[in-house]
Image (cartoon, rainbow, N blue to C red):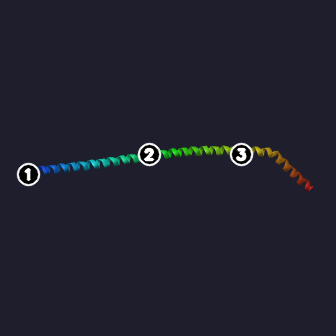
Amino acid sequence: MPQTQVLERIKEAEREADEIVEQAREEADERVEEARAEADEIRQTAREEAQSAAEERVAEAREEVETERERILEEGREEREQLTAAAQERTDEVVEHVVDLFEEAVHAQT
C-alpha cells in the first residue's frame, strides 16, 4: 500500500474519530439538558404538591379553629343562661333583703 494511501486512511480514521467524539459530546450535552429539564419539572411538581398540601393543612386548621370557636361560644351561651337563671332565682331573695334593710334603716331613724 502506498504511503499516501496509508496517510489518507489515517486522516480518515482521525476524522471519523473526531466525528464520533463530537457526536458523543453533543449526545452528552443533550442528555445533560434533558436531565436538567426533568429535574426542573420534578422541582416544580414538588413545589406544587407542597403548596397544595400546605393549603390543605391550612384549610383543615381553619375548620378545627371554627369548630373550637363554636364549641367555646356554645359553652359561653350555656354559662350565661345558667347565670341568668341563678340571678333570677335570687331576685326575690335580694328584694326581700333590701326591703328588710330599708325597714331597719327607717325604724332606726324613728
Tag 1 secondary structure? helix
Q: Residues within 10 Å of mark 1 (few under 14, many from 20)?
A: few
Q: Which mark sits nearer the N-terminus, 1 or 3?
A: 1
Q: Position of residue 83 (x, y in %)?
A: 74, 46
In this view, the mark in front (2 or 3): 2
| Residue at figure coordinates x 55%, y 46% from the top left | 61
Q: What residue sits right under mark 2 in the picture?
A: 48
Residue where numbered disc 1 is placed = 4
Q: Residues within 10 Å of mark 2 (few under 14, many from 20)?
A: few
The structure residue drawn at horizontal position 85% and vertical position 47%, both measured from the top left corner, is 96
Disc 2 to disc 3: CB gap under 8 Å: no
Q: Nearer the viewer, residue 59 or 108?
A: 59
* Residue type at tag 2: Glu
- Label 3: which secondary element: helix
Query: At 63% from the left edge and 43% from the top edge, which residue is drawn?
Result: 70
Q: Which residue is the site of mark 3?
A: 80
What amino acid type is highlighted by mark number 3? Arg
Q: Is residue 75 left or right of residue 37?
A: right
Q: Secondary structure at mark 2?
A: helix
Task: Find the residue positioned furthest to the front.
Answer: 1
Q: How many marks can you see? A: 3
Mark 2 vs mark 1: give the one in front.
1
- Three-letter residue code for mark 1: Thr
* CA gap, disc 2 and disc 3: 47 Å
Residue placed most toward the observer, 19 or 108: 19
Q: CA distance from mark 1 to mark 3?
A: 112 Å
Report the side of 78 relative to 107 (left or right): left
